[in-house]
Amino acid sequence: MEKTKLFYRTIRYFLFKIDPESVHHFVSYFIKIKGFLFLFFKPKRSSQVLDIDLCNVSLFNPIAMAAGFDKNGDMVNGLNSFGFGFTEVGTFTKKIQTGNPRPRLFRVPSQYALFNRMGFNNPGIEKGLENLRNARFYFAVSIGKSKETPVEQAVDDYVEILKTIELSRYKDVKKKIIYIAINISSPNTPGLRLLQNKKYIKDLIDQCKKTSDLPLFIKFSPDFSSIREFETTLHSALKAGINGVIVTNTTSDETITRYVADDIRKAGGGLSGLPLAQKSELYLKSALKICKGKVPVISSGAVMSKEDILRRLQWGASVVQVYTGFIYNGPTFVKDCLKYVISKINESGYPGLIDYQKKFIQRKSK
Ligand SMILES: Cc1cc2nc3c(=O)[nH]c(=O)nc-3n(C[C@H](O)[C@H](O)[C@H](O)COP(=O)(O)O)c2cc1C
């Protein structure tokens, strides 16, 4: 974990006395205002060293906000002003969803973790696209099946959402989408994780590819019965033609969620933050072994320090996503991490770094 600055530690002390979801809404308000003010400044890149090329889109850096923080698609400008290279917005379903009853988001401060059973509360894809008209930067869009859709009909949900994007009157919004994240890994939508199965995955990808020409990424859970089973599913997904992989979502593994109070845990949900570190890194290494050089791999799960970011980039992750780390480390986290990663790269050249970045830099200097 990062050593948190005294200023944010004090603020966090008071914020953590209030219900987490209410704090999220309160903080979102300031992020939106900051985003609005940010429109009057020319966005600054921290250093050319970290420029990346993801799905033919040039981005200022490979640190992204993970899905689920900006569920409405109205914080892209604000989050970029905190240093993020981009935000993965959503998860959006085909129609508005209220999600599970509150309380549904809990802190586990002793473990630097969060436990949530939000259940895809979101305004629906149409409203999401309308909100995204105001985004000045590129972003990714996460999509998922509705709560009431049975797993046998889940593919229709994804196809319908993609059609809505394709046919949307907000043509400029589609142009700013870096990739679509097909979310089949949240633990809080009944039957969703069953889609992470050879039986469903090929049809899901085939149908999505027929509907949209946007790059399609799949976000996996860290709770496969074994790493081999994950690798088999990943092979099937690659064979079906996915363009990228995100590992991982939150965990419902009871050996890890034991940190959560019994009454909260028993009602279901997924854990994020520090206790997820070992699993998310295990899945990352496995995904890199299979995908490196073929399609980009995005790391999500327990990115709690600047060292976590540098290490995962050095292993070959194309992007590192942050969520719980932002809550515990505060608004300066991303910019501090960027400074650190840049200084390390400048110190030791490109320490085992990332072929795609080298290629990108060579291409630019030609
Ligand atoms: C409150 C909350 C809501 C989330 N909602 C979503 C979501 O809608 N879609 C999704 O793909 N992931 C969602 N996630 C998972 C995060 O994107 C991320 O994969 C996970 O939290 C692990 O990363 P972290 O340890 O850095 O938080 C959510 C996580 C939290 C804490």
Image (tube, helix red, strand yellow):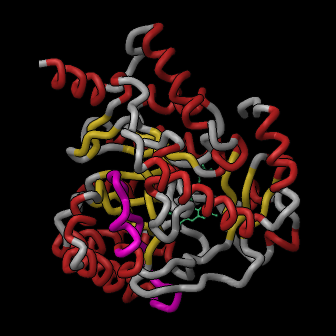
| Residue 226 seen from this side | no
Residue under the point 49% across and 71% down: 72
Q: Is residue 112 above or below residue 153?
A: above
Residue under the point 49% across and 60% down: 75
Q: Is residue 81 above or below residue 344?
A: below
Farthest residue, direction left: 366
Task: Pinpoint residue 188: horizontal percent, then vertical percent.
Answer: 61, 75
Asked if the magenta segment contains residue 131, the reply would be yes
Q: Quarter of the picture for ligand 1?
A: bottom right
For residue 15, side relative to residue 291 (left or right)? right
Say which of 25 and 165 sits in front. 25
Say which of 252 and 148 sits in front. 148
For residue 206, side relative to residue 319 (left or right)? left
Task: Pinpoint residue 50: horizontal percent, then vertical percent.
Answer: 38, 28
Please report the bounds of the magenta region as a residue range: 130-150
Task: Pinpoint residue 7: horizontal percent, then vertical percent.
Answer: 79, 36
Q: Main secondary structure of the magenta part?
A: loop
Asked if the magenta segment contains residue 54, the reply would be no
Say which of 9 and 360 sits in front. 9
Residue under the point 76% across and 64% down: 20
Task: Pinpoint residue 210: horizontal percent, then vertical percent.
Answer: 16, 73
Q: Quadrant of residue 145?
A: bottom left
